Amino acid sequence: MKRACVAALFCCLLSPAIIAKRRAVAPPPPTEARVGQPIAGLPSELLVRFFAGREEFNKRQDLDDGLGPVMNGMDCLQCHSVPAPGGAGVNGSSVIRFGKITNGVFDPLERLGGPLVQHRGIQVNDGAPLAFRGETVPPEATIIAIRRPTTVLGLSLVEATPDTTFIALAAEQAARNDGTAGRVAMVDNLAAGMKTVGKFGWKAQTPTLHQFAGEAYLNEIGVTSPFFPKENCPRGRCEDLRFNPRPGLNDNGEDTQKLTDFMAMLAPPPRGAITPDVVAGEAVFNRIGCNSCHVSTLRTGPNPLEALDEVTYHPFSDFLLHDMGPLNDRIVQADASGSEMRTPPLWGLRFLDSFLHDGRAGTIEAAIVAHEGQGRGARDRFHELNDGERAQLMAFLRSL
């Protein structure tokens, strides 16, 4: 399938150090109203595509669209709406994955509907031979993991960053030899027909925004598309699909491309106000080693689109897999082991009300304290901070 090129212009996010030097001429702090907007400077024809994509993103799917027969929601907004379409999930929204270890190997229990619970079923007409019901975790599962929906804001910049950047970053971390080295996830790229670097998802299991859109369309809403043409079997009972009211290919690829366009033209979440405490807090962040994994600055590669051509951006993530020890979900997915998780980007952190992959932490402080595995050293140094340093660190994190 041909991927449509998306032109975009990058809103420069200056580092705190630069902003501190230019504070007298810095623009006023952005408001929440600016979140979820297209990247500044898009030509009119691409703005049309952006808003068409946002309409598809917001659209409530129905049976005519191919909804279900089992799903977790009826639109993308259910998982990506805070503080605007494309953001993170509302407080308490989550999905459930499950499996078990059989003879030392992770079993996703696909025969029982795994590894993802689709907790809702479509409503069928009276007299239909089968009512599709939502799934539950089967009793055979010994591993149950909750995952909080992530933001898709600014991901066009991540996709435009060459695989070689992440490979080099992993090598640099390994050479540092401080026990925090990340690992590149090499995953199946369906369009390329080969393995490329995984950048998206809690396990870095997805390599492109187009694949991300198609996979979510299928697994969360139940809409099939060219890369994902097979419906999920409810509770693993594939024979039940003969009663599916909308069999076959639900989307010929056009709607999946619309979702891709929307994500590819979403601006990164803007920074909050940069105060002296924020600047001091970033220094604390770096000193205790948070930046070992939450890398502040990345750069896109050469790109025929000027907006994505060698652009510097600040996601505060290396997008690599790290062994998080007890702070993991035990789910083996794509190239990630049960103990590995991708470093989540911290941009947009100030809009969240729950933290970590499962939302267990109600505060940023609680999320830091819960760090384990390769994050343990930074956590321990956090404990050693005095009250003033902690306040500065929180001011910095709440500015992201």
Image: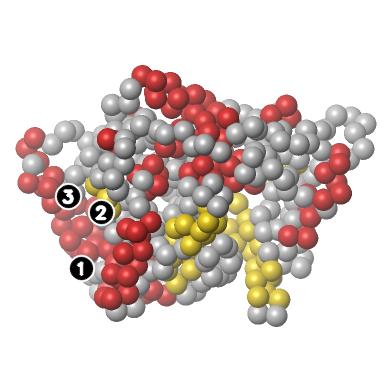
* Position of 91 relative to 247 (above/below): below
* Position of 257 relative to 195 (above/below): above
Whole-number angstrom distance, CA of label 2 to CA of label 1: 16 Å
Which is more N-terminal, label 1 or label 2?
Answer: 1
- Disc 3 target residue: 16
Residue drawn at point x = 47 percent, y = 75 percent: 325
Circle 2 packing at 10 Å, graded few (<14), some (14-19), many (20+), is some
Say which amino acid is labelled 3: Pro
- Residue 59, how many percent across, how many down? 58, 28
- Of tags 3 and 2, which is closer to the observer? 2
- Disc 1 target residue: 287
Which is more N-terminal, label 1 or label 3?
Answer: 3
Which is more N-terminal, label 2 or label 3?
Answer: 3
Circle 3 packing at 10 Å, graded few (<14), some (14-19), many (20+), is many
Residue drawn at point x = 82 percent, y = 38 percent: 244
- Disc 2 target residue: 297
Q: Considering the numbered disc 3 on the image, is that residue within a helix, a strand or a loop?
A: helix
Q: Is residue 181 left or right of residue 204?
A: left
Say which amino acid is labelled 1: Arg
